[in-house]
């Protein structure tokens, strides 16, 4: 059934991407359309193939983790290396690596033995889950459905966000095998939400959205005691993501490339991402700090303009400008300078093209430790954190040990955490200190978590790993060919998700066609397009 769904998603990939472009006011033949191919059908095709491989392994008496390296991670941890998986990953995602860390004391045997979750007992009925779909990234609703279905054994009612309502016929067709089997129903009626969250047939609710939506579901609009629901709720709620830049001696090309990287973290999908980098953390003692900020400003100015399709965006940009003294207005895109630890930008997810900048003292590991403490203690949420550092800094044992202290569900080192989102076998969710696998059971006297941080529970996780701690994604500091010239073993050119990539549409469409039908003759055109980007 998963493989049949893979085929129907492939058949409707073009319609899916073009409908998403229409929703967001993007030219379907322009470079920005690449975002909709990559974060829409491509992501779902990868997940379906990965889940199918997991189920197939279990059917054949093997474990989902069999064949995946289990490697050492800092602090006495073990980690499953989920990327790269095969030769095509090593070619198309050259130099990118993703490891899923487990808590200290969890050994290889437990990792392998417990992988499978609900598929270890597929006859157990998990009931019906209501999935409240996100309105920003179009792969999120189907990916949340697949998690409920495979990891928890629940059939799903998918209620689309009003923004993505035009995708209703696309999803019904693309996911037709699940619909026809009675495992999925998809609706877009705005009035259905309040009705469904209190329906007795719904035994679980999962949403991707804001903390305000989460609390509205828990307590109703009047926040009265009578409105409190008893249904368990899991959620992915975003947060304020840091971008920590470890000072070092960078070339002019390094400054320019990493400035584009920062601009991408903030401006991908116009900033309407739960993991859009929001606070840039720089060293006060870095001689190149001013030059780097100039490059960031220039990169944000160069990035293509797009409509503010997400409701309230202009109001949030205006509020950010009004609440800060140091504001650089780049035509509706803001850079907020000199943030203090109590600044509203540290606690408010703007969900708009707004980048804050804060400065901390120190160099090297001393600065990194201060930045980790700042991110942990001052920024809202624990979903994703980004670190940019020279390869020789990343390779040191002290750098890796410092990562242990960074309490985030996904950490990107020289790679945006969005790569972790796109990696189907990597779990996606808040750091588990604030993120129980499941909400408390009211029948057992459990309470309701009110301060949820960045959410409750993991999604994606196509290996169906049991209680992982976090995902760490590592990428090259430089792109090809400069990567090879400086000793980095990576052939990755400017990534197609970079907002200034000129061939993003053709590259991402070809990647999607390859995900739909992975034949080797499809790879050279992908690489050719990527190199022109």
Image: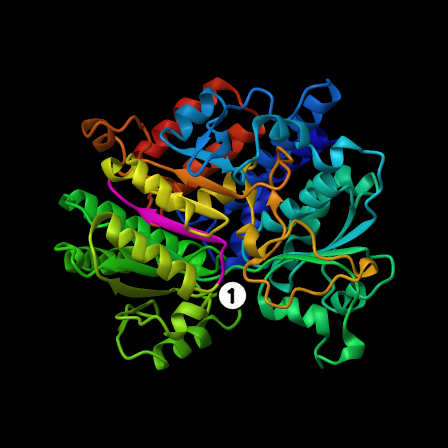
Question: In front here: 319 or 406?
Answer: 406
What residue appears at the point 64 percent right and 38 percent down from the top-left corner? 466
The picture places residue 125, in percent across and down from the top left corner, at 85, 42
**Stretch in magenta:** 381-390
**In-front residue for pair 399/194:** 399
The quarter of the picture where the C terminus appears is top left
Instruction: Give me the residue at 38% from left, 37% from top.
Output: 474
Is residue 380 positioned above or below 219 on the image? above
Q: Residue furthest left?
A: 287
SS class, disc 1: loop
Q: Residue furthest right?
A: 200
Q: For this rendering, which residue is in front, 505 or 128?
A: 128
Residue 355 makes an appearance in the image: yes
Considering depth in this image, is 312 or 254 the residue closer to the camera? 254
In the rendered structure, the answer to whether residue 523 lies left or right of residue 481 reads: right
Residue 363 location in percent, x, y? 20, 52
The answer to if 44 sits in the magenta stretch is: no
| Vertical relation: 27 (above or below) 108 | below
Q: Quadrant of the N terminus?
A: top right
The reply to whether the magenta stretch includes residue 383 is: yes
On the picture, is 509 further left or further right than 501? Answer: right
Residue, disc 1: 310
Residue 485 horizontal side relative to residue 302, left or right: left
């Amino acid at each position: 059934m998963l493989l049949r769904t893979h085929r129907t998603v492939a058949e409707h990939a073009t319609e899916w991407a073009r409908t998403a472009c229409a929703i967001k006011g993007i030219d379907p033949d322009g470079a920005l359309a690449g975002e909709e191919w990559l974060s829409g059908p491509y992501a779902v095709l990868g997940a379906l193939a990965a889940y199918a491989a997991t189920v197939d392994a279990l059917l054949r008496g093997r474990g989902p983790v069999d064949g995946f390296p289990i490697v050492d991670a800092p602090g006495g941890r073990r980690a499953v290396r989920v990327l790269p998986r095969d030769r095509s990953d090593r070619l198309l995602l050259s130099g990118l690596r993703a490891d899923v860390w487990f808590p200290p004391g969890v050994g290889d045997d437990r990792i392998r033995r417990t992988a499978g979750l609900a598929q270890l007992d597929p006859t157990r009925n998990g009931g019906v889950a209501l999935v409240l779909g996100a309105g920003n990234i179009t792969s999120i609703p189907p990916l949340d459905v697949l998690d409920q279905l495979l990891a928890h054994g629940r059939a799903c009612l998918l209620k689309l966000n009003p923004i993505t309502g035009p995708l209703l016929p696309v999803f019904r067709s693309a996911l037709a095998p699940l619909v026809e089997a009675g495992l999925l129903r998809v609706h877009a009626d705005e009035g259905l939400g309040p009705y469904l969250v209190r329906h007795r047939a719904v035994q679980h609710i999962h949403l991707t959205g804001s903390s305000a939506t989460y609390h509205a579901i828990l307590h109703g609009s009047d926040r009265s005691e009578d409105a409190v629901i008893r249904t368990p709720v899991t959620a992915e709620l975003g947060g304020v993501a840091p971008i920590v830049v470890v000072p070092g001696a960078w070339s002019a090309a390094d400054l320019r490339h990493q400035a584009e990287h920062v601009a991408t973290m903030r401006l991908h999908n116009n900033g309407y991402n739960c993991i859009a980098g929001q606070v840039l953390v720089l060293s006060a003692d870095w001689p190149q700090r001013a030059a780097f900020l100039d490059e960031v400003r220039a990169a944000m100015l160069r990035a293509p303009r797009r409509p503010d399709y997400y409701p309230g965006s202009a109001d949030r940009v205006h509020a950010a400008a009004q609440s800060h003294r140091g504001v650089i207005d780049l035509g509706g895109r803001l850079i907020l300078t000199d943030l203090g630890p109590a600044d509203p930008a540290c606690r408010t997810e703007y969900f708009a093209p707004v980048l804050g900048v804060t400065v901390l003292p120190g160099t090297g590991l001393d600065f990194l430790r201060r930045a980790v403490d700042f991110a942990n203690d001052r920024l809202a949420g624990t979903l994703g954190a980004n670190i940019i550092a020279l390869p020789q800094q990343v390779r040191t044992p002290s750098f890796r040990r410092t990562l242990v202290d960074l309490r985030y569900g996904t950490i990107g080192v020289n790679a945006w955490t969005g790569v972790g989102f796109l990696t189907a076998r990597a779990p996606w969710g808040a750091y588990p200190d604030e993120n129980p696998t499941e909400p408390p059971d009211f029948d057992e006297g459990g309470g309701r978590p009110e301060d949820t941080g960045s959410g409750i529970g993991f999604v994606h996780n196509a290996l169906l790993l049991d209680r992982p701690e976090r995902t760490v994604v590592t990428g090259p500091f430089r792109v090809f060919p400069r990567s090879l010239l400086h000793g980095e073993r990576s052939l990755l050119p400017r990534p197609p998700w970079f907002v200034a990539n000129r061939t993003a549409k053709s590259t991402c469409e070809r990647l999607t066609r390859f995900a739909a039908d992975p034949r080797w003759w499809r790879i050279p055109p992908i690489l050719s397009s990527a190199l022109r980007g």
